[in-house]
Each structure stands twice: as structure tokens, then as C-alpha cells.
Amino acid sequence: MALVLTDEELMLAYRAGDREAFRELFRRYAPRLEPMLRKRVSDPELARDLLQQTFLQLHRARYDFRQGARLRPWLFAIALNLVREQLRKGRRWPMRLTDQDDRALAASEPGPDARVAAARDIERALAALSADQYDVITLHWAQGLSFAEIAEALGASEVTVRVRAHRGYARMRQVLGYGNAEAEVDISRKR
């Protein structure tokens, strides 16, 4: 039976010169980071470039990784900072589904029209969020990070992250037309 190393053990092995450890980190995280980046910038080519830049930054900063720190929030922070840097340059990309996304959703089951409509509604609700709320909601809801991990990734307190999540989910409910009582979102499910 093969020994499975934690992300942190892989990062420390990579720092020590193990190139296979870097490849394993890429295999673990590229499939999670790319969809998040793609949704954030809505340009598949730019998302792939940002993904490559994320791992290039990981390589460059490998000696800054502190033993005892968690890798996942650190890596997501690198990716989000690269997106913010692109946005600061004045380039904005709308968060929208592409025609290809529409076709993929339409081909899925059941009720393709309902799924496309639901995806559009969620997209509209996410687009109504502030950048800070969007980051917290996508890291929590879509990527499954805990509030502590999100706080670490964003360099904010856990209380601040929880407030952003609460306000973001409330804003989404408002945009989607749900009353507070009917659509209470359980933000405590992933701590």
C-alpha cells in the first residue's frame, strides 16, 4: 500500500528538492483551482494562464512556506491575489456562462431548461456580490474551504469572513427573490 502524503508534507518535500511532490500538488489542486479561476475571469485561456502563474508563484515562494502552516489556504490566496492583480490593471471580466456552458447544462439531466435557468439565476446572484463576498462565497460553497481556511487565505479574521458570508448569502437570497425564512442558508455546515 502506497503512503499518501499530506499537502503540507508534499510541499516540504518539494522545498527539499522532490520534483514529483510538485507534480502531485499540481495534480491535486489544478482541477479545483481552474474552475474557480475560469468563473472569476470568464475567459478559459486567461484562467489557464492564471493557473500556471499560481503554480509558478508557488514555486517561487516555496521557501516562504512555513512548516506547520496549511497549504490549501495559502495556494488559494495566491490564486485570488493573481485575479485581483488582473482586475486592478483595469481589466474586468463579467461572470457569465458561455454558450458552451449552456450547451453542457442543456445536455445534462433532468430538466435541461430548468438547470440552465437555475444556473443563470445563481450566476446573476453571484454577480450581485461585492468582490469580498464573492471570494468568500465561492471558496466556502463551491470549493469547500472552512471559514478558518478562508480567513487564512484572505488574510482576514474568521469573524470578518463569517460576516462577509452571512451578508453575501443574504444578498444572494434577495437577488433570487427568496424570503429570509424560506431560504435560510446554513453557513455553519463547513467549519
Image (cartoon, rainbow, N blue to C red):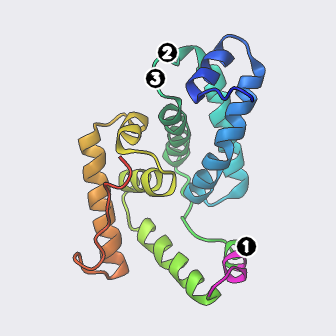
The residue under label 2 is: 67
> How far apart are the two marked residues, 3 and 1, measured between alpha carbons?
39 Å
Q: Is residue 12 above or below residue 85?
A: above
Magenta segment: does it hold 107? yes
The residue under label 3 is: 69
Where on the picture, by quarter, is residue 113?
Answer: bottom right
Of the residues shown, which amino acid type is indicated by label 3?
Answer: Ala
Q: In this view, does 130 lie to the left or right of 162?
A: right
Residue 184 horizontal/vertical position (percent): 28, 71
> How far apart are the two marked residues, 2 and 3, measured between alpha carbons?
6 Å
What is the magenta range?
Answer: 103-110
Question: Viewer-nearest of labels 3 and 1?
Answer: 3
Looking at the rendered structure, which numbered label has been put on residue 100?
Answer: 1
Mark 3 element type = loop
Of the residues shown, which amino acid type is indicated by label 1?
Answer: Gln
Q: In this view, does 31 lie to the left or right of 127?
A: right
Instruction: Give me the residue at 65% from left, 14% from top.
Output: 15
